[in-house]
Amino acid sequence: MSMFARVMTGCVLLAALAACQTSTADRPVETSRAPYREMPEEMYRLAFDAATANVIARNCSNLSTANPVVNKDRVALFRKLDAQGYEDRDFDAMQANLPKKRMQSEVFAYIQKMGIIVDEPATYCGAGYAEIRQGTRVGRYLRKRG
């Protein structure tokens, strides 16, 4: 699994478990001798949107994740970051230093904004269909089944 994929996997796990995550520490953890580099905002947004689409699709049987679209965006971003000098050790550090507090806040805000009720799959479907109708990136990362 590539470093970028591991970072995105970490974001997926954080988004799915945000309700249980109460840590407020966002202090960088040193994972290599390289100086710590902040996660670029565009990487954070892509990972957050992909994680959101994944969680919606897992909870709504009428929707699935459009993996080819996610992968296309991921590859394009990875190439851009690679051209800017990012290396595997930077992605390792980013994975170790995911902004948990920020992610948790954004997950809670998204759930509230979209009217999602955690134990009610229909509310995930409603959120997913709204994202698709609005043409958001989360909506592009979702497909209707059937």
Image: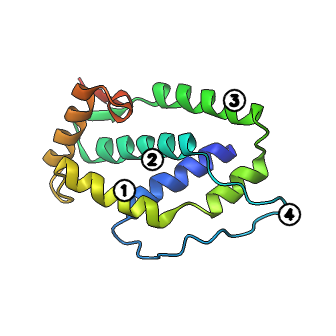
- Amino acid type of the residue that numbered disc 2 sits on in the rendered structure: Phe
> Tag 1, which secondary structure?
helix
**Can you tell which mark lies on residue 48?**
2
Residue carrying label 3:
79
Tell me which residue sits at (25%, 54%) in the image: 111
Q: Residue at x 61, y 46 (%)?
A: 40
Q: Quadrant of residue 22?
A: bottom left
Marks 3 and 1, the one that precedes in the sequence:
3
Residue 11 picture location, percent across and down:
50, 53
Q: Position of residue 16 (x, y in %)?
A: 38, 58
The residue type indicated by label 1 comes to Glu
Mark 2 lies on a secondary structure that is helix
Q: CA distance from mark 4 to mark 2?
A: 27 Å
Q: CA distance from mark 1 to mark 4?
A: 31 Å
**Front one among 108 and 63:** 108
Tag on residue 106? Answer: 1
Q: Residue at x 53, y 61 (%)?
A: 99
The answer for how far apart the CA atoms under marks 4 and 3 are is 23 Å
Point out the tag, 4 or 3, that comes first from the N-terminus: 4
Task: Name the residue beneath numbered marker 4.
Answer: 33
Q: Dots 3 and 1: beta carbons under 8 Å?
A: no
